Amino acid sequence: MFKPPTRYIFRSFRRLYSTSKDLIVDGTTYKNDNWTNVPPFMLDLITRKLHKNPSHPIGILNDLIKTSIKDMDYTIYEDFHPIVTRYQNFDSLGFPEDHPGRSKSDTYYLNKDHLLRTHTSAHEQECFVNCVTKGYVITADVYRRDEIDRTHYPAFHQMEGARVWSKNDPDLFKTIQDDIDAIPKTNIIVEDPFRDEPVTKVNPMQKYMSHEEVRLVSVHLKKTVEYIVNQVFEKAKESAKLAGSTEPYLNEPLKVRWVEAYFPWTSPSWEIEVWWKGEWLECCGCGVVQQQVLLNSNLGEDKISWAFGIGLDRIAMLLFGIPDIRLFWTLDERFHKQFQQGQVNTFVPYSKYPGVKRDVSFWLKDEVHANDVMETVRTHASDLAESVVLVDEFTHPKTGRRSQCYRINYQSMDRNLTNAEINDIHDKVEKELVDKFEVEIR
């Protein structure tokens, strides 16, 4: 049985401890209140900083992107603390008060004023204000209460970038065009019906910008993203060839396409998809930044900007052949010894241990959010929960009472599980559902 290194356990206890009245993380005290819902195991994860580990798939991918833009006038930010204020995470970005992302079912709160960031944009305003280069890139771990399956985990990693120009520049068009011309060339094959006409009825421009400003900013954005994507996937091809692969796609130019999208903080907006191993993969959402976001950062009415966002975990799973997102967080050396700095190689699975399925069925008193059920399972099973699926819903025809049944698959990536161990965990899950949500176990 694999055991976490003692130094990791001690470090976690030094960083985090709680009392009945408050939570102390890295020397800062957060008073508990009725918003507090972050479990201890989540606060353990903030010590890991996978994106800064040069020999971890997340860190390798992060370093590949950083290296590709190192001479393109971007400031790199990757040391922001994951505990942020409600203002940073929501208010500064214009989230409506009733936005579901603010709810306790979606977000981990230390108290009503502090939470684990749900996106890198929580630091956007700070970067816009303090950045002295033309652009910036943020990489960070982010946290959301989410479903449990092989592609979702409550902690994951995002990369966000932005670039800013001033409309007061008398040679603005030339400035942007010069910036476009400075982006390194690639042999990438691009399908983009919106390159010369970025504005459509379903993807409108902002009134404070001219059509030519939108066109130039969007071209710079897209060529930047295309360059980054090409660098990452070409590295994957190179590593595959070194490993002996002779697949035909390894000798073909990378093919990408642009599709229209919608994001609250950009307009117009797009997503880039990459043709990889016989299918189109969504890689990055981006667009021309809404002026209000810039005004919220006190940048002035003259600024125009683009921004992009990349989910690193999903791309790393594809590039490295990781079948289960939980593996990113394992402490098992059989995983970590397979990767080295600067190399993209395919993960070789080690022994797969059998899962143990258990159903939990209950009558509802009040509505229970699926994320709350997932979080109850995670609290007691941690990474032993491989998947949780709602398999049945039933309304009694006479009483009108509603019933739900969730199927939980408990499976360790490191060892065999015993029935006694799982029974104990499952009993605790059922007890918390009864105590916290007043359900009646069937």
Image (cartoon, helix red, strand yellow):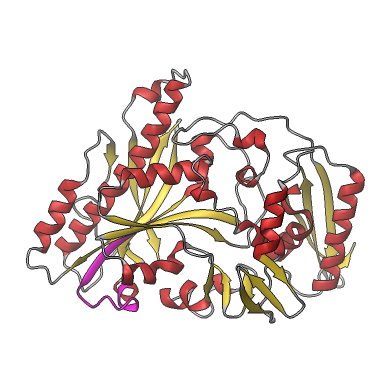
Front residue of this view, candidates 352 and 78: 78
Q: Is residue 229 left or right of residue 218?
A: right
Q: Is residue 364 at least partly visible in the picture?
A: yes
Report the residue at 83% width, 60% height from top. 429
State which quarter of the image contains the N terminus.
top right
Q: Is residue 296 on the magenta stretch? A: yes
Residue 25 occupies quadrant: bottom right
Name the residue at 9% across, 57% down: 174
Determine the residue located farthest toward the right in the rendered image: 420
Residue at 29% x, 73% y is 291
In this view, the residue in front, 26 or 155, is: 26
Q: Is residue 59 above or below residue 361?
A: above
Residue 315 part of the magenta-drawn span? no
**Residue range corresponding to the magenta coloring:** 294-308
Camera-side residue of 395 and 44: 44
Q: Quadrant of residue 322?
A: top right
Q: Which quarter of the rendering shows the C terminus?
A: bottom right
- The residue at the point 82 percent across, 45 percent down is 357
Residue 15 point in image, percent of width and height: 64, 64
- Determine if residue 385 is in view: no
Residue 176 drawn at (x, y percent): 16, 57
